[in-house]
Every structure is written in C-alpha cells, then in structure tokens.
Image (tube, rainbow, N blue to C red):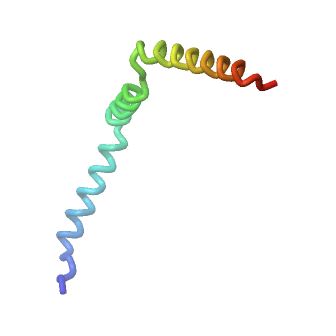
Amino acid sequence: MKRPPKEYEIRRLLHRAWSRRRLAASPSVRNALQLNLNRELEEPRGETVKYFFAALILQGLLYLVYNRLGIS
C-alpha cells in the first residue's frame, strides 16, 4: 500500500497547482489562447471561394437531376 503524502508534499502540490492556475488566469495567457483559437477558426481565403463554387455546382447538378426525372 502506498504511504499517505507528507505535509510538505501536499503544500508543494498545492503551491504548484495554485501557481498554474494564477498563470493560466493572467491576461497575457488568455490573449494568447484567444489568438490561437482565432487562428484555428480562420479559413484560408481560397477556401471560401472553393466552397461557394462547390455549392453552386451541386445546386446545378440537383437542378439537372430534378428536370431529368420530371418531378413536379
């Protein structure tokens, strides 16, 4: 059985956890995380145009199929 942690070990772990929490709450870390999130959500400029034309082509194909089948 593992021995229970000693008092100094508990203090060290609490201090480490509190320091990480303080560091994570600092404005610079929050700003950096927000910038990373914005960068990940950002699409390259060419992607939007590609999706637009893909949707346009799909719409045209659906229109052709609709007319060929004579669905009214």
- Residue at the spot 35% in from the left edge and 30% down from the top edge: 36
Q: Farthest right residue?
A: 72
With 8 as the anchor, is 31 left or right in this view?
right
**Residue 62: percent from left, percent from top:** 64, 22
Q: Position of residue 25 (x, y in %)?
A: 37, 43
Q: Which image quarter is the C terminus in?
A: top right
| Nearer-the-camera pick, 23 or 66 | 66
Residue 64: x and y in percent read 65, 17
Find the residue positioned furthest to the bottom.
Answer: 1
Tell me which residue sits at (56%, 16%) in the image.
Answer: 57
Q: Is residue 31 above or below residue 49?
A: below
Residue that appears at 33% across and 44% down: 24
The one nearer the camera, 41 or 5, is 41
From the viewer's perspective, is residue 46 above or below residue 21?
Answer: above
Number of numbered callouts drawn:
0
- For this view, does 52 lie left or right of residue 16? right
- Where residue 1 appears, as percent x and y from the top left, is 18, 87
36 above or below 9? above
